[in-house]
Amino acid sequence: MRRDLNRLANEVFDLLVIGGGITGAAIARDASLRGLSVALIERNDFAHATSAHNSKLIHGGLRYLRSLELGLVRESLRERRIWQRIAPHIVQPLPFLLPVLDPGFGARAKLNAGLSLYDLLSFDRGWLDDPDQRLPGHSWLSAQAALACEPCLDSLPVAGAFRYFDAQMYSPERLALECVLDAANNGAAPANHIEANTLLLRNNRIEGANVTDRQTGVTFDTRANVTIVAAGPWADLFLAQALGRTTHQLRRSKGIHLIVPPVTRDHALTIATEKSHFFVLPWRTGAILGTTDTAFEGDPDTVCATETDIEEFLRFINAHLPAVRLDRDHVRYAYAGLRPLVDDGAADTYAASRRAELIDHKIENGPDGLLSVIGGKWTTSRALAQKTVDAALEKLGRKAAACTTARRRLPGGAIERVSTFMNEARANGVALPNADHLARLYGSRLPTLLAILNGNPDLCQPLSPSGDIGVQILFAIREEMALTLEDVVMRRTGIGQEGDPGSSALDRAATLMAAECGWSEPHRRAEIDSVATIFRNSRK
């Protein structure tokens, strides 16, 4: 997959999608599979913001039952199963414990009723060919059994715990990327590091956008019959600038996450507090603590996990799970993301709905040829894309093939049974201790990655504690449109996803990129400094 700027500058597309997070990627995938010509542009890199900086869960939204959003929960649970089917290497079951701290019968009965409804709404959770991917219903564990499972609960007055299942993404960045790859494989023209400056308006109709290649500074027009803005937390700001007026305003919710050493044995924890909840999620070699939910009023480009954020969240975690005794030195990495929420009048961002809204600007006395997508959640992005493409087809006056994204596996998802695939990867494909890591990142595309090795043992050497190897860098450049060191370190591989890999790892990765891309030494150093800044900022 390579950027084709000639196509972007000279072809008139059916659709131009602005925004390369999971929503834009899913729209591009769906539309290209239905026979539409599609351009997808992203001003940074695919899945660089909200789509990466999350809890890495594919879940039904158990807490949304409180607000009786049964439709959203049912949709989320259906989509959870779909992601498990089409990307089994990246999306896999995760067991949760929900401890009950109130010894009275009422609290247990209330949670049991909610989890029973959750099970009922996920009636299709077993409709998967791979038995390893099927999710059991919830069950009750005594206090003794709960503490035997997860000793870190022993500092709490645990009356027992409910065990239930959701699913986790090994790499949300790569899951979004596989949607982009599938779109490209079906004729779409995706391009990262292309910024939309403004929309092209003629006779009260949007005809595409004026864009700039941020790698070269070259500006040109990309034309399309329908333009879709899927810019996440930036959507309302871009539309206000491009249309000269405010249309739909978003509420931005900031969520921070901390990556720390392992906290639990096998289970994730859902800990309910007086006004909210938090997760302890086993992930790769550590654990993710998440998340906060606070209103954010600043420039979305400036969001970060501040030192104050980190210290306050650690105090909160320690207060509600004292046995973990976490301090600042335990934090390997801290990151923050913004949830783009539809303003539904809720009292605060925690109570605000995670529903999505699709806007046809013509209906609201705006220009024709323009759709915008705001709100939504990772889990339901595929379904949102289906609705958006349906609307685009209506505007185009086109009848295209039916949506197939719920059944078609993603490029790395051609796996019949995950356990068999992993065993084969260990035995046949990768004689390395990181076989599981590579298999989870690339799935059935793993042989294509390894084919680049061509007998070069240097490309098999681990670059960092994450277990990533040199050949991944070449693969990211040649096959996955990686243009910067940050693209490779933070999104194509796991080199920097669990925290600072160290200067040696960055130097070696940049040296491989420089040789492949023809970078000068000053350019190579600048790339290293840019990525090192990410980790410096997370330590402030």
Image: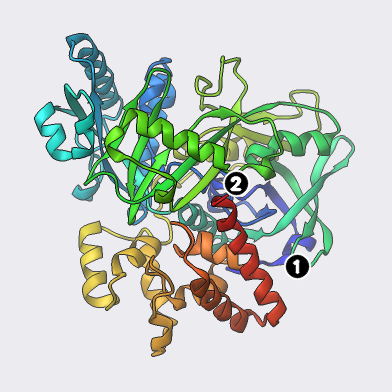
Residue 500 sits above or below residue 198 on the image = below
Q: Secondary structure at mark 1?
A: helix
Residue drawn at x 50%, y 40% is 310
Q: Give the quadrant of the N terminus.
A: bottom right
Residue 537 sits above or below residue 293 on the image = below
Q: Amino acid at mark 1?
A: Asn
- Residue 321, disc: none
Graded by Cα atoms within 10 Å as few (under 14), some (14 to 19) or many (20 or more), the crowding at tag 1 reads: few
Marked residue nearer the N-terminal end (2 or 1):
1
Look at the image and tell me whether residue 419 can be seen: yes
Q: Quadrant of residue 135?
A: top left
* Residue placed under numbered mark 1 in the picture: 6
Q: Nearer the viewer, mark 2 or mark 1?
A: 2
Percent position (x, y) of residue 169? 39, 49
Foreground pick, 302 / 437: 302
Q: Is mark 2 in CB contact (under 8 Å) with mark 1?
A: no
Q: Secondary structure at mark 2?
A: helix
Graded by Cα atoms within 10 Å as few (under 14), some (14 to 19) or many (20 or more), the crowding at tag 2 reads: many
* Residue placed under numbered mark 2 in the picture: 24
Residue drawn at x 20%, y 67% is 423
State the colouring used for the structure image. rainbow
Percent position (x, y) of residue 439? 33, 65
Residue 474 sits above or below residue 37 on the image = below
